[in-house]
Image (tube, grey):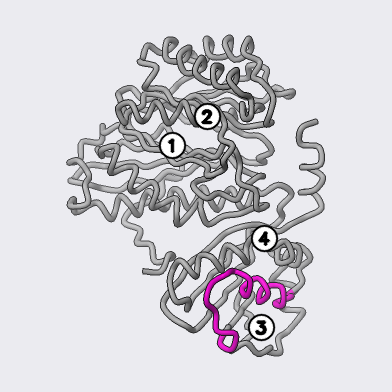
């Protein structure tokens, strides 16, 4: 089945948030890790032990919080909370960094009265610097009083996880299972160092559906492959990428398994939440002015289509052409040809928006002014049809601008 054929047996909750699913509270505060006064420490807490799942970066150099979170979920497959700091990645910090991450887990667990194994930890920010633990400790001690189940708590958490992001990223949907309302929500951060092979910079999903940890893990990984694994901003996979899902089970539905008649509907809701967050990260790429979507069709397999889509979306030349509003389809065909999968060089079609620029691998005369006007918009869709099979995939990214270099030239300072 092509990647974009997603049924939508759910509705978007416009004013929903990560605290909308039953049992969840969240909040954030400024503890002093950032040079600004913006929040830099936050948490999501569940009133009951929640079934948990996680997906992590494939980067060999994995930050200390990932080890802690893996250990927590592996213990029982349950979480009561996740605590997150921004401003410092706690990555490549050796034994001290690992000790600090475990201390964060233990101290927050004590602060909210739960087992340490029921707390996950995530960090994002500058690599290679030790956490200022005096500030972290005081922040953790104050954090429980900032937690609430309303939008204020959710927005406080979302602010606490941002680094170079310009906007908060949050989405919520609801559907009916076994006559009960079930809610799925998500929040994420990510703007630079985005080229995941597992998830995103940091992502968090909450739901009140009743589902086991193993089943949730299956669906989370599947959703990730179609969404977070299909975005790129700059081709760099972070040391800290993590996606964590928590299911409180308080909605009252029968436990979700592959045999449950609502399994596909819940999977579609989860995938939608992940896709919205993934696209929001791509749109918010550092210095970006446009969201770019690459749709590949007619490949020999979905895997081949995905490889091509990710190659095109990650091409610096394609990204630069989009920024310059240049309908240079030569950049696109070159990326298609170096994706490392089977392509018939005589049957490729390319379109930019609705404008056909290549048909059966031969140039098509098109209105350059019309193409220029389209490329000046804030969303650009590039279509590639290989005319070889039924494989399909969609990837998302952004344009490459002068501001990307400016931001990353001085990220640490």
Whichever of callouts 3 and 1 sits on the residue coming sooner in the sequence is: 1
Q: Considering the image in quadrants, where does the N terminus appear?
A: bottom left
Q: Is residue 31 visible?
A: yes
Looking at the image, which residue is at 17% across and 41% down? Answer: 254
> Helix or strand or loop: what does disc 4 sit on?
loop
Compute the Cα span from label 2 to label 1. Answer: 10 Å
Looking at the image, which residue is at 44% across and 26% down? Answer: 120
Answer left or right for 11 relative to 253.
right
**Disc assigned to residue 244:** 1
Answer left or right for 297 relative to 209.
right
> Helix or strand or loop: what does disc 1 sit on?
strand
Whichever of callouts 2 and 3 sits on the residue coming sooner in the sequence is: 2
Whichever of callouts 1 and 4 sits on the residue coming sooner in the sequence is: 1
Within-10-Å neighbours for mark 4: few <14, some 14–19, many 20+: some
Please name the residue that numbered disc 2 is placed on. Answer: 122
Please name the residue that numbered disc 4 is placed on. Answer: 378
Position of 96 relative to 234 (above/below): above
Please name the residue that numbered disc 3 is placed on. Answer: 357
Looking at the image, which residue is at 60% across and 51% down? Answer: 195
User: Do callouts 4 and 2 mark residues in contact (Cβ within 8 Å)?
Assistant: no
Q: Position of residue 214 (x, y in %)?
A: 29, 40
Position of 306 relative to 267 (above/below): below
| Quadrant in the rendering for residue 75 | top left
Compute the Cα span from label 4 to label 2. Answer: 32 Å
Answer left or right for 91 relative to 56.
right
Position of 99 relative to 91 (above/below): above
Give the residues drawn in magenta, as a range: 327-347
Within-10-Å neighbours for mark 2: few <14, some 14–19, many 20+: many
Q: Nearer the viewer, mark 4 or mark 2?
A: 2
Of 81 and 344, the residue lying toward us: 344
Whichever of callouts 4 and 3 sits on the residue coming sooner in the sequence is: 3
């Amino acid at each position: 089945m092509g990647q974009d054929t997603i049924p939508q047996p759910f509705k978007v909750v416009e004013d929903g948030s990560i605290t909308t699913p039953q049992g969840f509270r969240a909040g954030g505060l400024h503890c002093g890790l950032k040079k600004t006064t913006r929040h830099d420490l936050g948490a999501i807490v569940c009133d009951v032990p929640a079934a948990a799942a996680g997906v992590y970066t494939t980067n060999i150099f994995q930050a200390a919080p990932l080890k802690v979170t893996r250990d927590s979920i592996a213990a029982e497959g349950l979480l009561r909370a996740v605590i997150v700091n921004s401003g410092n990645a706690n990555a490549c910090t050796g034994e001290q960094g690992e000790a600090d991450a475990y201390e964060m887990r233990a101290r927050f667990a004590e602060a909210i009265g739960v087992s340490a194994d029921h707390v996950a930890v995530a960090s994002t920010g500058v690599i290679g610097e030790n956490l200022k633990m005096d500030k972290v400790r005081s922040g953790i001690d104050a954090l429980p009083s900032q937690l609430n189940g309303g939008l204020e708590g959710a927005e406080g958490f979302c602010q606490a996880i941002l680094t170079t992001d310009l906007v908060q990223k949050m989405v919520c949907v609801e559907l009916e299972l076994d006559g009960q309302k079930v809610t799925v929500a998500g929040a994420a951060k990510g703007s630079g160092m985005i080229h995941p092979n597992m998830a995103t910079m940091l992502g968090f999903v909450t739901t009140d559906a009743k589902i086991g940890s193993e089943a949730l893990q299956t669906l989370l990984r599947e959703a990730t492959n179609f969404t977070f694994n299909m975005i790129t901003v700059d081709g760099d996979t972070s040391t800290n990428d993590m996606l964590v899902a928590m299911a409180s089970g308080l909605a009252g539905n029968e436990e979700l398994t592959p045999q449950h008649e609502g399994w596909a509907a819940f999977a579609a809701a989860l995938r939608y939440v992940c896709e919205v967050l993934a696209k929001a990260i791509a749109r918010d790429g550092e210095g970006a002015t446009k969201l770019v979507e690459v749709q590949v069709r007619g490949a020999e397999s979905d895997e081949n289509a995905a490889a091509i889509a990710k190659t095109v979306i990650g091409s610096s030349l394609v990204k630069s052409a989009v920024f310059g509003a240049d309908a240079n389809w030569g950049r696109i065909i070159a990326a298609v040809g170096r994706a490392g999968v089977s392509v018939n060089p005589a049957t490729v079609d390319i379109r930019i928006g609705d404008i056909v620029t290549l048909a059966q691998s031969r140039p098509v005369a098109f209105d350059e002014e019309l193409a220029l006007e389209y490329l000046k918009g804030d969303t650009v869709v590039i279509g590639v049809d290989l005319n070889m099979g039924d494989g399909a995939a969609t990837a998302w990214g952004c344009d490459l601008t002068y501001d990307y270099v400016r931001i990353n030239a001085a990220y640490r300072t």
